[in-house]
Image (cartoon, helix red, strand yellow):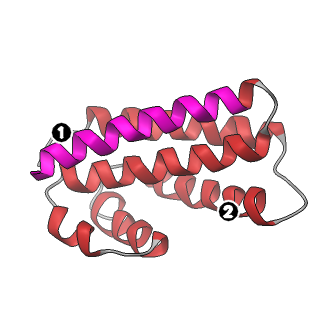
Amino acid sequence: MSDPDYAAAYLAKAARTLASARNMLAIGDAEGACNRAYYAMFNAAHAALYGAGFGEQTAAIKTHSGLLSFFGQKMVGTERLAGEYGRAINRTGRLRSSADYMLDPPSLSEATWAVRAAEELIEAVRTMAPS
């Protein structure tokens, strides 16, 4: 597959994951909503990087922190995407970690924020001009 094909596939995956986050939020599952919101954003980050032509470098990254750092450098640091998206994905990652590994889960308010942040990032990536 080419970089544009990967970008489209990751964007579609982000949209499916966002739908899961919305469903979990609707039934009051803050933990599940935070987890799915994070992965929606993670997939959107992949889509953004592939869409910007960084496919070879992106494919070589094997960790979440590595991908998020690269996303910050190449997408936020170069102002292809606003800084708020880098901060949002990092905050959502912390909420996901709390949801997945701690006994004190995120609140429904935090989960609602995370789902909204994922929606905004996906929309920004969707409308991003190709490089």
Q: Look at mark 1 in the image and give the residue it sits on.
A: 129
- Mark 1 or mark 2, which is nearer the start of the sequence? 2
20 to the left or right of 32: left
**Eyeballing the image, is 18 above or below 50?**
above
- Could you tell me which residue is drawn at 84 percent across and 65 percent down? 102
- Count up the numbered dots: 2
Q: Crowding at label 2, few (<14), some or many (≥20) Cα neighbours within 10 Å?
A: some
Q: Is residue 120 visible?
A: yes
Q: Quadrant of residue 28?
A: top right
Q: CA distance from mark 2 to mark 1?
A: 29 Å
Under tag 1, what secondary structure? loop
**Eyeballing the image, is 104 above or below 11?**
below
Question: In the rendering, at what x and y percent does residue 103 appear?
Answer: 90, 61
- Could you tell me which residue is drawn at 27 percent across and 61 percent down? 78
Question: In the rendering, at what x and y percent does residue 86 appear?
Answer: 47, 57
Amino acid under disc 1: Ala
Whether the magenta-drawn stretch holds residue 8 is answered as yes
Q: Which residues are magenta?
A: 1-24
Under tag 2, what secondary structure? helix
Amino acid under disc 2: Arg
Q: Look at mark 2 in the image and give the residue it sits on.
A: 94
